[in-house]
Every structure is written in structure tokens, then in C-alpha cells.
Image (cartoon, coloured by chain):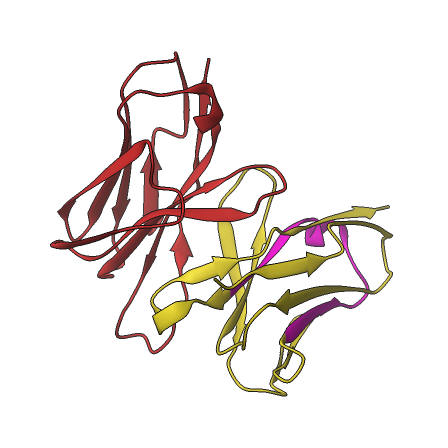
Chain colours: A red, B yellow
């Protein structure tokens, strides 16, 4: 079974709808991240969490919110989706005790906002 | 803020040929990570470099870190179709709390 899972894998929605993307991990890592990937722009950090009570904004947090329901779960919400939020979204985890910042990525969620 | 520039942005090579991808940082590199992404899929960790002059290899892929030049290179020897994908470099950002990623290099390997 995959260590980092994301649901759904694909989602098509309409402008103005509320969307939640979910991420779960079985690696026991304390840190979790949400990124979006757009063609030609690499990965941009949306939010990150170092533990259940610690949530931080990344480079592009406007229009997004997150919830760290448990150490293993980190969800990303789009309160009112807009077309320019169409992208590939990745969740990642890392271990603060691992001695480095190696991150482990989920398979991604492809979101299309019409 | 730190920025990573990768070159080339895309690359088409014939199977069996060697190739090099570069990642240049706007700031000092403390930790440099290479990932590979198959099209439309998640990222797979390849290797991490932390010391200037460090070189690591895995199968036919070799990565080097030139700390003075604030640059890392990824070299693939005798490329195969399985090497096709997007290669991304990531670097430790401020406070070593998160990674900053480059824009990626798209590699196609033709038969």
C-alpha cells in the first residue's frame, strides 16, 4: 500500500463550488505539505504543517485553507473554486527527526475548475 | 527568497546518449534534492546532496553538488526510455524548514 495517499485522484468542478482534497500518510511523519503544480512553474507551496497544532502559509495560500485533523491527515480546501486553481495538487510528508528535508509525495490530485 | 533555475527546460535525446541537467540556485545551497516525476504522477526521490563537491550515483544517474557555483548537475549515462519524465531539483529553504523547487526539466528519450 502507498505510504502517502490522496483522494480524489481526479476532480472536475464548477466555479464557486467548495472542494476538499484529502491526504493521508502511514509513514508516521510529523510534517505535511500541500503543493500545486502548473505547467512550466514547478511546485509551489500552498500550506505546510509541522504538527497538528502548527499550520503555516506557503507562497500561494490565498484562496485555500487547510486542516490537520490528525498527525496522519492533512486536507486542503478551496472555499470557492475558480478556474485558475485548475492544477495538479500534491501532498507530501517529511520527518523532522530525519536529519534532512527529504519529502515523500502522494500520487497527486488533478483538479479542473470549469 | 531563494530561486532555483533548471536548464534546459526540455530535452529530447536518442536512446543510449548521455545527458546533463543543471540546477542553479540564487543563494547558497545547503541541501539539494533531485526528484523524478513521471508525467501526471507523483514525485520519486532520487538522491540528496549536502556537501560541496559531493557526488552520488544510483544506477545510471549521477548527481554532483558544486557549492561554490551554487549549482548541482544530474547526469544520465546511456539514457533509456524509462528515464523519460520531469526532473526537479529542490533546495533547503530559509530555516531548513521547507523545500524550494525548480521549474523542472522535461526529458524525452527517443528510440
Residue at the spot x=28%, y=54% of the render? Answer: A32
**Magenta span includes A114:** no
Judged left or right of residue B54, residue B9 is: right
Any part of residue A1 in sight = no
Residue B56's place in the image compared with A74, above or below, is below
Q: Position of residue A26 (x, y in %)?
A: 25, 53
Residue at the spot x=43%, y=67% of the render? Answer: B93
Residue B54's place in the image compared with A76, above or below, is below
Judged left or right of residue B45, residue A11 is: left
Judged left or right of residue B12, residue A106 is: left
Any part of residue A69 in sight = yes
Between B70 and B51, the residue placed more toward the observer is B70
Q: Position of residue A31 (x, y in %)?
A: 26, 59
Residue at the spot x=46%, y=13% of the render? Answer: A114
Residue B78's place in the image compared with A48, above or below, is below
**Magenta span includes B75:** yes
Residue at the spot x=63%, y=52% of the render? Answer: B104
Judged left or right of residue B57, residue A89 is: left
Q: Position of residue A54 (x, y in %)?
A: 16, 56
Identify the magenta region: B71-90
Between B46 and A46, the residue placed more toward the observer is A46
Amino acid at each position: 500500500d502507498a505510504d502517502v495517499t490522496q483522494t480524489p485522484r481526479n476532480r472536475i468542478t464548477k466555479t464557486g463550488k467548495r472542494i476538499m482534497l484529502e491526504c493521508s500518510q502511514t509513514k508516521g511523519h510529523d510534517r505535511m505539505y500541500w503543493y500545486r503544480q502548473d505547467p512550466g512553474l514547478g511546485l509551489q507551496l500552498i500550506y505546510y504543517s509541522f504538527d497538528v497544532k502548527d499550520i503555516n502559509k506557503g507562497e500561494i495560500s490565498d484562496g485555500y485553507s487547510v486542516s490537520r485533523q490528525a498527525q496522519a491527515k492533512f486536507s486542503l480546501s478551496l472555499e470557492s473554486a475558480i478556474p485558475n486553481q485548475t492544477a495538479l495538487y500534491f501532498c507530501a510528508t517529511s520527518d523532522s527527526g530525519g536529519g534532512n528535508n527529504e519529502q515523500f509525495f502522494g500520487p497527486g490530485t488533478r483538479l479542473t475548475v470549469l | 527568497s531563494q530561486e532555483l533555475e533548471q536548464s534546459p527546460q526540455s530535452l529530447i535525446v536518442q536512446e543510449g546518449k548521455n545527458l546533463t541537467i543543471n540546477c542553479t540556485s540564487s543563494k547558497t545551497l545547503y541541501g539539494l534534492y533531485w526528484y523524478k516525476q513521471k508525467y501526471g504522477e507523483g514525485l520519486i526521490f532520487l538522491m540528496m546532496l549536502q556537501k560541496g563537491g559531493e557526488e552520488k550515483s544510483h544506477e545510471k544517474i549521477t548527481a554532483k553538488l558544486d557549492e561554490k557555483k551554487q549549482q548541482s548537475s544530474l547526469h544520465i549515462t546511456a539514457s533509456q526510455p524509462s528515464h523519460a519524465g520531469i526532473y526537479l531539483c529542490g533546495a533547503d529553504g530559509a530555516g531548513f524548514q521547507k523545500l524550494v523547487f525548480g521549474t523542472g526539466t522535461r526529458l524525452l528519450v527517443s528510440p
